[in-house]
Amino acid sequence: MYLDTRIARFDAAPGDRYRPTSTPIYQTATFEQESSLGFGEYDYSRSGNPTRTVLEERLAELEGGRFGFAFSSGVGALSALLRASTPRWILIGADLYGGTTRLLERVVRPLGIKICSVDTTDLAAVKGALASLQRERVLRRGEGTAGLVLLETPSNPLLRVTDIEAVARLVHDACGKLCVDNTALSPYLQNPLALGADVVVHSATKHLGGHGDVTAGAIVTSDAEIAEAVRFLQNAEGSALAPFDSWLLLRGMKTLGVRVVHESRSAMEVATFLEGELGVGWVHYPGLKSTPGYEVQVRQARGFGQLISFRTGDLKRSQLVAEGAKLFHIAVSFGSTNSTISLPCRMSHASAPNELIPADLVRISIGLEDPRDLIEDLRRVLRRRDSPLPKANSKS
Ligand SMILES: *Cc1c(COP(=O)(O)O)cnc(C)c1O
């Protein structure tokens, strides 16, 4: 079956004798047992809950993996994964979500795990970084998961594209595991497991939930060893998603396709407009042919997503744009029904300074509004007299 059919058609309530078409919220902490000597299928909602099970199977299905897990947030999922895979080293993409960098630097590094960063869009650099880990003997063959490579593609907020298949090959040659944070595109547009990744993580708060009303995270893998360790931590640490939030996510995911298609189409129009207004090189969007990585994106994904970032020339002007745009809420996060605008350097990435992110970078997330209104809104703020175009681009 094609993806849209698989999203629409699923057993919402396996085993329920009333056959509801929407998954019931099993709002219960505990389940009565038939015997005092052992447990039935469910015993306690921290360990497992039927609403969450339906969700976790949906997540696995959409990413094409064998095992799915739902967590109370995206960083909760990342935290479980980073420890479940017990790596001796972690190699990260140079451009990651700020909260991920904070988790790595301030929680994981102090545990004694070596963390290095590399520009994963540069395959020679990845190869070099893996070779240097090998030389340090941090990485040895035949010892389980020597290490983990964690990347985002397209990355957030610079939207740089990494060739997942090529990096997976290098990582596997070095006996590591590859984890891709697939939040930016959602499983509707990209499936890293099919391209060779071992694990996929999501901030389900974004596209999967899609309405900005739930905080959630997901892990999907076909690696039984990692899945076992993740399942153990999810229960041992109590980080699983609650029944009501699982239901919200299930509900949001039903419309993933229509939202992502509409938003991506609008984003292409907005990005094309911005490039015309600001100039080539000032707009980052993997759907623009001028963007490095465009060919890789076309090869490995089914679309370009709805995140765009652009520069205006200076921080003051970016602030005027963000504060002057009427249809874009100033907010962190993305993937909701309404468009948002933010300055990553001061907002989502402020907790983890990254010299790659220019101070004047503006990130926008395209929602379900009519793109003609969004373009008009941006045209108005970009052409304000008190926010002159950057010198390099000003049209006389
Ligand atoms: C938001 C985000 C996260 C963190 O997810 P939360 O649900 O906010 O904990 C991780 N990765 C990416 C790419 C994100 O955008």
Image: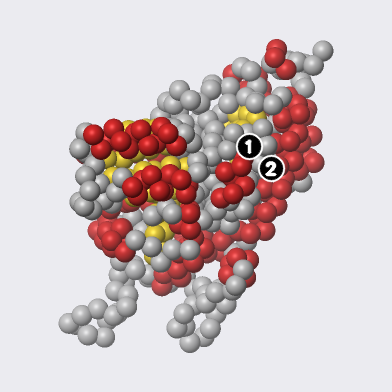
Position in image of residue 98 (x %, y %):
43, 35
Q: Classify 152 as above or below 301.
A: above
Q: Nearer the N terminus, badge 1 or badge 2?
A: 2
Q: Classify 281 as above or below 25.
A: above
Q: What's the residue at 45%, 68% (across, down)?
A: 57
Mark 1 is surrounded, within 10 Å at the Cα level, by few (under 14), some (14 to 19) or many (20 or more) other residues, namely many
Q: Which corner quadrant holds the N terminus?
A: bottom right
Position in image of residue 346 (x %, y %):
50, 26
Q: Is residue 240 left or right of residue 187?
A: left
Task: Name the image quarter holding residue 220.
Answer: bottom left
Q: What's the residue at 59%, 34% (across, down)?
A: 292
- Please tell me which residue lies in front, 151 or 309: 151
Mark 2 lies on a secondary structure that is: helix
Q: What's the residue at 80%, 41% (across, down)?
A: 372
The residue where tag 2 is placed is 267
Q: Is residue 153 left or right of residue 312?
A: left
Position in image of residue 276 (x %, y %):
76, 29
Task: Name the image quarter holding residue 311.
Answer: top right
- Please tell me which residue lies in front, 258 or 328: 258
Q: Amino acid at mark 1?
A: Tyr
Q: Classify 69 as above or below 318.
A: below
